[in-house]
Image: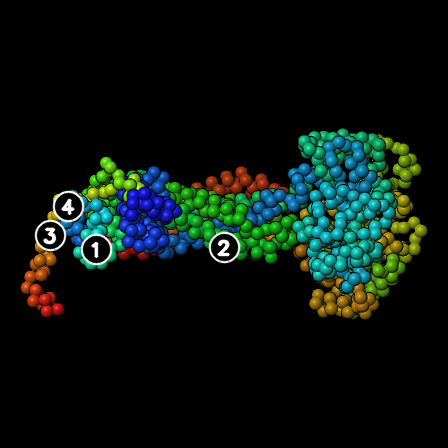
Amino acid sequence: MSAGDNRINAPPSAAEAVLGLCLPKGPVGRSILGDLRQDFLEHCSLHTVQHARRWYWKQVMTVGGRYLFALRLLDSRAQSRYRISRRRGGDLMGSLMQDLRYSFRSNVKRPAFSLMVIGLLGIGIGATTTIFSIVDAVLLKKLPYSNPQELVYFDNAAHSVPLMRDWATRTNSYSVVAGVWDRTVDLTNDGTPVNVQAALVTEDFFSILGAVQHRGRLLAGEDFEGPARVAVVSHRIWQTRWGSDDETIGRTVTVGGQSLTVVGVLPRSFKSPVADVGDEVDIFVPYNRYDDTATNRDWYIMSVIARLKQGVTQEAAQTELDALSLRLAQEHPDHYKRRDGSPRMYSIISLHDAIVGDVRTTLYLLLGAVGLMLLIACANVANLVLARGSDREREMALRSALGAGRPRVVAQLFTESVSLSVIGGALGVLLAYLGVNAFEALSPGGMPRVDDIAVNWRVMGFALMVSIITGVLFGVVPALKAARVDVSDALKDATGTATAGRGRLRLRSGLVVLEIALALMLLVGAGLLFNSFVRLMNVDPGFSTANITVVSLRPGPAYSEEQRREFTRQYLERVNNLPGVELAAAGVTLPLGTTGGLMCCWMQVIRPPTEVADESTEGSHVGNPESAIITPVTPGYFEVLGSRMVQGRGFVDADEFETVPPAVMNVSLARRVFGEERVVGKSFYFGDTRAVVVGVIEDMRHWGLEREDDEHLYVPFFPYASGHRIQFAVKSGVAFGPMAERLREMLWAIEPDLPIVDIISYERQVANSVAEPRFYSALLISFATVAVILAAGGIYGSMLYAVGQRHREMGIRLALGARGINVVGMIVRHGLVLTVVGVGLGLAGAYAVTRTLESFLFGVTSTDPSTFVAVSVLLTAVAMAACFFPARKAAKTDPMETLRTE
Amino acid sequence: MALSYIGEFEQMVLLAVLQQGDEAYAVEVRKELERSAERPVSRGALYRTFDRLEAKGYLAWELEDGNPIPERGGHPMRKFRVTEAGVEALRVSRSALLKLWRGLDTVLDEA
């Protein structure tokens, strides 16, 4: 074969390239490549070129593979030589791998220690991650609308349509303004009748949110002219009620008595932004722009959202809105001036804030609480690491003596602590999965966006970050300590060294103090919430719940006004005749009877007659209109509830036939409207109706035990109960179970097709109304309990360690005649000092931060002295108990044994 | 200095390098091994053994890149040399083996 042919017969270039990558860089690798090329040519001359090529590939596997495998995994000697020729980065990586392998071995060697650390960190990180996943979903995740940061909400509930139009037309801040009016309606005429959330929406509702239809179309301009004929439905109801059937488009449904044609389905991701928490709007109906309510400034119906124009800040929009509010108060003093003559001001908040509401503070509070818990767990782990320290100290000293630099030793210790904390973090993520599910199952509702809560990648990233920070936190003290070790001291037989022990002891004492301080802070928070909850439960609501059963009904529009009235009358009569029933009455709502914001009552302007006679009166402070919540109730309503009549009387059967209807005001309303002592017999207008006051009833807490009553006007149930909601209160001497059964049977005997919303004992209903404070205080109490257990464990471990350190001292003392009790006292005294310092610091810390709790507290201040004292005493007692057992152990030291070893 | 133990293949490689004298290039050493041992030698094993012997200080090499031959694609050639320590290790190994061989010739000849 000629030399020219040789050139053609080169080994496959890809194979040579691969081999080049596997071989060491430099002359060794290149010479091997040369050898193989030479061999390749020899193969070519003996066999075919194809054969030689195949052979060459085989060499790539054997020679290259051998180098690759040997260098990376097996032959550490060659590896170190190999590494010399590489960059320093490779060296760092290698030592990290070495550290990891070493920490793995070192942690496996001490399984009890490692499991304890992992468990402690798992609990801490798990709790933190759980709360973070809630924070992430509720607070951090963007709202699912286009450019959500531009969306604002007109605060404080519903507004009238004319006011909404003023905002849209008389300002320059918004590109779009839209309104939505949520109602619960019956969906009939198509399968079983059900109650659904429906929303009347204005023209720009979907466009402002950037919604796109999933099927059919959204609402268009002409849909809003005249009574509604069409509807758009949610993905959820499309799926559950109509089985995702495309034929749904064009179907006619009866919503709240109106026949509507379904024209579109919304995507799964779309949610109405202003629906009540836990409720999802299923049917969207166009709001007739010529509706009677559209020109009435007394109908507060629309929740209003707007999109800020590009470049307009919320502050600028607010300034413009304030100016408009002042002008409106001039133009419509009846509507936009308060009783004291000041103009009604409105504010805008970001839509995100509107949806999230008060939950933000709650969540940050919980996050703070679990953060404290995590810190305590960290301190505990640091304590454990220190306790394990003396043998590690010798090991580290040995490593130093053998040439490991301080950075290397510190890096090794950090690798150990971070690898443990990352495993703890993995456990934490598992616990967070459970925690999130538990939270969803147990939370009392009221948490917005709860469906979005999930342990996702962001949450896992958070957990990883927390794990690493945690590892560094609990690793830093022992690591620095180890790096400062005096090699010669530590290498001597160290069983008797007291000096190293002393420094360590101080450090451990510091950690115990920290744990106690943090636990106390948590405990103060939990104590304040508990205290506040107890006070809430002891509030006088202005009515009694004892032995009352509540029946809630919602006869839909299928029932005429007359039918509903007749049915109510008949049912009340029969129930009142039931054996065991003391009294039954009904109203559109009972105090604390509405949970979840169901519409029950309406607001109307109350005016004294003088005001009506002279409408042009302006600036007069006396007799200005006052809005009140109109609540129609039957005779016996106040009596069943055991409320106190302050003046006059309650309703009687004859009241419904009076030409000038009698009315009962609550104390707040009577004081506001008349401001006088005696108001019975005075007449006034509510809306256009002239009425006369027959009684004044004490205020009842309608909207929450923590909320003072609003101005309420009670009117006869007949004929004013025009809503579709009735609540019966039945007071009886019969137990709830059998009573509920009888009430249900009796209802079905009269109206077999009427769905019962709820039969519940009134006590239970009221308890439900405080489910949220109860849940959050329970949550915080459980965090605090874990914190106290951790802190107690910390002090126990620390004392045990101290006793071990001072074993000989104890023995000598006992041998010299000290009594056991003295030794116990000595140890407990030491513990007491730590506890007192910890409690002192904790009190100061708690004093500084409990302010944030203020909005959650009811009837207690955030610096309530009794709570501070009580939790300090409690924690001190727990800490003393934790000291006692190690102390007793010390007292039982056998002096002879000690002296023998001396 | 205590000499570390050398394995059979390491011994063979050292001897083959010595046999080749001034021509102890990897390709020639391999051929020599295959000739004497009458079996193919894996190049991967050979190169790793070179490395190992070098790490033990028994083998050294120098580059011959004065006039690269075209068959090697311009790559340099390593010429191996057994070090003093290598020779000493072979000597120790041989004397240990010889002691063990003593008096066993008849048994092994029969086998």
Which comes before the other along the chain, label 3 or label 1?
1
Local SS, label 1: helix
Q: Which residue is mark 1?
A: B34
Amino acid at the residue labelled 2: Leu
Q: Are marks 3 and 4 in contact (CB under 8 Å)?
A: no
Local SS, label 3: helix
Q: Is residue A242 visible?
A: yes
Q: Chain of mark 1?
A: B
Q: Are marks 2 and 4 in contact (CB under 8 Å)?
A: no
Q: Is residue A640 visible?
A: no
Expressed as whole percent of the image width and height from the top left, the position of residue B83 reads 15, 44
Which of the two residues, A375 or A876, is positioned nearer the viewer here?
A: A375
Q: Chain of mark 3?
A: B
As measured in the structure, the alpha-carbon distance from the residue carrying label 2 to the one carrying label 4 is 67 Å
Which mark identifies residue B21? 4
Which of the two residues, A113 or A264, is positioned nearer the viewer here?
A: A264
User: Which residue occupies the extreme right position in the image?
Assistant: A659
Please tell me how crowded label 2 is: few (under 14), some (14-19), or many (20+) other residues with Cα within 10 Å. some
Camera-side mark, 3 or 4: 4
Image quarter hosting the C terminus of chain B: bottom left
Q: Which residue is mark 3?
A: B92
Q: How is the image coloured?
A: rainbow
Expressed as whole percent of the image width and height from the top left, the position of residue A268 reads 67, 52
Q: Which residue is mark 2?
A: A430
Q: Are marks 3 and 1 on the same chain?
A: yes
Q: Are marks 1 and 4 in contact (CB under 8 Å)?
A: no
Q: Are marks 1 and 4 on the same chain?
A: yes
User: Which residue occupies the extreme left position in the image?
Assistant: B103
As measured in the structure, the alpha-carbon distance from the residue carrying label 3 to the one carrying label 1 is 25 Å
Expressed as whole percent of the image width and height from the top left, the position of residue A244 reads 70, 59
As measured in the structure, the alpha-carbon distance from the residue carrying label 2 to the one carrying label 3 is 62 Å
